[in-house]
Image (cartoon, helix red, strand yellow):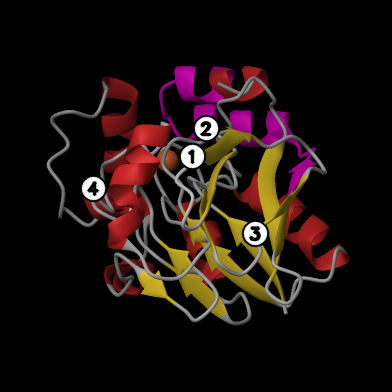
């Protein structure tokens, strides 16, 4: 089965639609979502409704989803992020709140695991170093373990029992092989707010038969999302950063 892998959509419906279209065209029939579905962006209802209807969805919640639900202290959020959380709280329908509330912190399948931050700290850890990958290996059983949160398309892979780790960033079209017996963590990057200086939506395809993962970068109508952010009264900074992919 081919799985479309998405993370950190952050209420950016234009980016989500473009990413799903690209993933569908590449044959995705199931979807994995690593959380942060809402926050930052202008269209939380459209995004929740679209994600919740994806076929064979395996989805976890992120720290922004928890913040919107009032389940996470937002004192460490910066001012624009806080403002976006408050906008989302007053905009989301009751039904969409209820859907977000049901999302688990971790999904474990035979051929993969899904969390938002890291397996040991699903809401808050940015898994970006080899040491963190090592430290997290005892917290998940099936690989790849898909993560989000850092908004960076990166991978870590270790062939057992050797402890040498291959790690790196994943560029558009790059295919990563994750054969049986390897432990891996993969971040598909952010669909709705990329932070690797590439302003295209980031997403990927996981082939659970061939055990490969391929990153795809997808152009979308950034100006349309920016206009909606400004019209919604969300801080302009969150519109501007989309142009730069950071
Ligand atoms: Fe995020
Ligand atoms: Fe996050």
CB contact under 8 Å: marks 2 and 4: no
User: Which residue is nearer to you in this view: 74 or 158?
Assistant: 158
Tell me, yes or no, if residue 128 can be seen here: no
Q: Report whether 148 appears left or right of 92.
A: right
What whole-number distance in Å separates the C-alpha atoms at marks 2 and 3? Answer: 39 Å
- Looking at the figure, which quarter contains the N terminus? bottom right
Instruction: Find out if the beta carbon at label 2 lies less than 8 Å from the nearest ligand 1 atom.
Output: no
Q: Looking at this rendering, what residue extends furthest in the front direction?
A: 162
Q: Which mark is residue 229?
A: 2
Measured from the top left, where is residue 199 in percent x and y? 69, 27
Measured from the top left, where is residue 137 in percent x and y? 35, 54
**Residue located beneath label 4 in the image:** 67
* Mark 2 or mark 4, whichever is nearer to me: 4
**Residue located beneath label 3 in the image:** 178
User: Which residue is nearer to you in this view: 238 or 216?
Assistant: 216
> Upstream in the sequence, badge 1 or badge 3?
1
* Mark 2 or mark 1, whichever is nearer to me: 1
Q: Is residue 96 magenta?
A: no
Query: What's the magenta region?
Result: 215-240
What whole-number distance in Å separates the C-alpha atoms at marks 4 and 3? Answer: 34 Å
Instruction: Find out if the beta carbon at label 3 lies less than 8 Å from the nearest ligand 2 atom.
Output: no
Q: Report whether 25 appears left or right of 20.
A: right
> Upstream in the sequence, badge 2 or badge 4?
4
CB contact under 8 Å: marks 4 and 1: no
What whole-number distance in Å separates the C-alpha atoms at marks 2 and 4? Answer: 19 Å
> Upstream in the sequence, badge 2 or badge 3?
3
Occupied quadrant, residue 79:
top left
CB contact under 8 Å: marks 2 and 1: yes
């Amino acid at each position: 089965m081919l799985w479309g892998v998405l993370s950190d959509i952050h209420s950016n419906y234009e980016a989500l639609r473009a990413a799903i279209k690209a993933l569908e065209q590449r044959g995705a029939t199931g979807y994995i979502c690593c959380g942060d579905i809402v926050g930052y962006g202008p269209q939380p209802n459209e995004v929740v409704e679209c994600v919740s209807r994806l076929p064979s969805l395996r989805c976890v919640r992120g720290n922004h989803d928890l913040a919107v639900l009032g389940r996470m202290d937002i004192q460490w959020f910066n001012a624009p992020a806080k403002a976006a959380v408050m906008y989302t709280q007053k905009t989301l329908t009751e039904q969409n709140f209820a859907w977000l509330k049901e999302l688990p912190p971790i999904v474990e399948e035979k051929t993969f695991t899904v969390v938002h931050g890291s397996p040991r700290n699903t809401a808050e850890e940015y898994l970006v170093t080899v040491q963190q990958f090592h430290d997290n290996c005892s917290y998940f059983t099936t690989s790849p373990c898909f993560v989000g949160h850092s908004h960076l398309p990166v991978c870590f892979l270790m062939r057992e029992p050797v402890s040498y780790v291959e790690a790196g960033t994943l560029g558009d079209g790059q295919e990563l092989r994750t054969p049986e017996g390897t432990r891996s963590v993969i971040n598909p990057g952010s669909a709705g707010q990329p932070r690797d200086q590439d302003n295209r939506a980031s997403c990927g395809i996981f082939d659970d038969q061939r055990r490969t993962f391929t990153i795809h970068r997808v152009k979308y109508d950034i100006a349309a999302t920016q206009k909606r952010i400004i019209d919604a009264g969300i801080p302009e900074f969150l519109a501007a950063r989309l142009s730069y992919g950071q």
